[in-house]
Image (tube, rainbow, N blue to C red):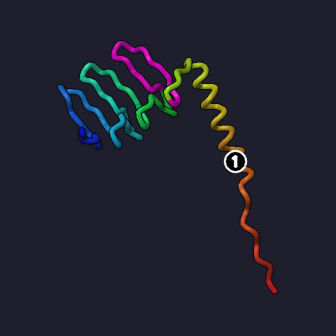
Amino acid sequence: MSEVKNGRYEINGEVWFFKDGEIHHEEEPAIQHKTGYKAWYLNGQRHREDGPAIEWPYGDRQWFLNNSELTEEKFNQWLEMKALNEKLESTFEPKPKERTKK
């Protein structure tokens, strides 16, 4: 049985991050090639919520959420909806009840 990869691996000048055997990093690209190619992955899926999940060295970019590719326009619409949902959730969070004095 092969060993499950975890952590940072450098292969031929490229950097790869793994968690439980899947390509994964929560804060930076999980794959960083010496050419400038960068790819964000979560749990083995191309995924990034604050920008393109793939950046090519020649300038092209691709947006992915949960391994599904989106156009830049659809990604920006998703981002706006996410911000609105977060605002609504914070507005309607239950407030702690005040204690009444006896």
Q: Which amino acid does the dot numbered 1 rest on?
A: Glu
Which span of residues is magenta-colored?
Answer: 52-66
In this rendering, the answer to whether 60 lies above or below 46 is: above
Question: What is the quadrant of residue 14 in the picture?
Answer: top left
Write down the residue under mark 1.
Answer: 89
12 in magenta = no
Q: Residue at x 24, y 38 (%)?
A: 2
Closer to the camera in the image, 1 or 92: 1
Residue shown at the point (33%, 39%) measured from the top left: 21
State which quadrant residue 75 falls in: top right
Q: Residues within 10 Å of mark 1 (few under 14, many from 20)?
A: few
Q: Is residue 14 above or below residue 73?
A: below
Q: Residue furthest bottom?
A: 102
Instruction: Report x, y in % for residue 58.
Output: 35, 12
Q: Position of residue 38 (x, y in %)?
A: 35, 25
Q: Magenta stretch containing residue 64, yes or no?
A: yes
Residue closer to the observer: 68 or 28: 68
In the image, residue 101 sits, relative to residue 73, either above or below, namely below
Q: At 35% across and 43% down in the image, what residue appears?
A: 20
User: Given the current orientation, which residue lies at the most extreme front position?
Assistant: 1
Residue name at image x 68 percent, y 44 percent:
87
Asked whether, in this view, residue 73 is left or right of residue 33, the answer is right
Q: Quadrant of residue 80?
A: top right
Could you say where residue 25 lies in the image, as x and y percent from the top left?
Answer: 38, 39
Instruction: Give how far across and how far down residue 90 sits, in percent.
Output: 68, 50
Counting the numbered discs, the total is 1
Quarter of the image with the N terminus is top left
Q: Quadrant of the C terminus?
A: bottom right
